[in-house]
């Protein structure tokens, strides 16, 4: 047991030291470490140009939610409780649900979510990570469901005049990982443990 604990502590310390070396960079970074003895660590840097006024929130399962995108907003009831870090107090920037699914929103300059059709449900990008944490226990579940594109993302125009440009990275307790990007209006999913 002592060796297992020491190995885990050493892996965590190394992970923290390595990710802290990237502090001077001005881009958000997410790293997934899959070690021996089922050690899975997800870490991220938040190299944003201003204070995001972040707060920690704990949400129980069973919360009725809607997509904050007007009359066609998607609606759901959370299946899983979660702990999130908010960005600007409007949505989850990062979080983990009770099943160990982790979600991280990161900047992607090439993001283009396309134009909403008249039929698709809508979801504000500020709730994208929360939707995933509320509805899925594993990366596979999320990939299967989100690949069917059950909603169109709406990205608000920011005070600087540009639209929010984000992609979503998720990981789970098995070390599985996926990244969801919208480029030229099309969903691109990068899925795998590599």
Image (cartoon, rainbow, N blue to C red):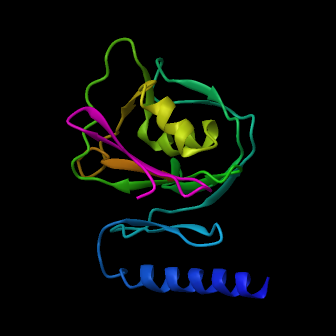
Q: Is residue 77 left or right of residue 194?
A: right
Above or below 89: residue 123: above
Residue visible at 52% across and 47% down?
Answer: 91
Q: Is residue 134 left or right of residue 157?
A: right
* In the foreground, 60 or 157: 60
- Indicate whether residue 24 is drawn in magenta: no
How many marks overall?
0
Residue 135 drawn at (x, y percent): 62, 36
Instruction: Please identify the quadrant where the C terminus is shown.
Output: bottom left
Above or below 49: residue 140: above
Instruction: Please identify the quadrant where the N terminus is shown.
Output: bottom right
Q: Residue furthest top?
A: 119
Above or below 31: residue 105: above
Residue visible at 26% across and 44% down?
Answer: 111
Residue 18 drawn at (x, y percent): 43, 83
Task: Answer with the quarter of the image where residue 130 lies.
Answer: top right
Residue 186 drawn at (x, y percent): 26, 32
Bounds of the magenta segment: 171-194
Q: Residue furthest right?
A: 1
- Indicate whether residue 176 is drawn in magenta: yes
* In the foreground, 15 or 77: 15
* In the foreground, 193 or 54: 193
């Amino acid at each position: 047991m002592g060796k297992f604990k020491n190995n885990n502590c050493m892996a965590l310390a190394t992970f923290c030291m390595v990710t802290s070396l990237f502090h001077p960079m001005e881009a958000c970074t997410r790293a997934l470490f899959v070690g021996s003895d089922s050690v899975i660590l997800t870490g991220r840097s938040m190299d944003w140009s201003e204070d995001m006024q972040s707060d920690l929130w704990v949400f129980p399962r069973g919360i009725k939610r809607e997509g904050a995108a007007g009359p066609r907003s998607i609606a759901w009831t959370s299946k899983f409780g979660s702990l999130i870090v908010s960005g600007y107090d409007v949505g989850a920037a990062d979080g983990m649900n009770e099943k160990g699914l982790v979600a991280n929103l990161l900047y992607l300059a090439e993001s283009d979510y396309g134009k909403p059709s008249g039929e698709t449900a809508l979801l504000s990008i500020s709730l994208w990570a929360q939707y995933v944490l509320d509805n899925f226990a594993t990366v596979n579940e999320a990939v299967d469901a989100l690949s069917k594109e059950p909603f169109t993302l709406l990205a608000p125009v920011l005070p600087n005049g540009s639209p929010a440009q984000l992609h979503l990275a998720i990981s789970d307790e098995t070390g599985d990982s996926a990244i969801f990007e919208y480029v030229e209006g099309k969903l691109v999913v990068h899925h795998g443990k590599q």
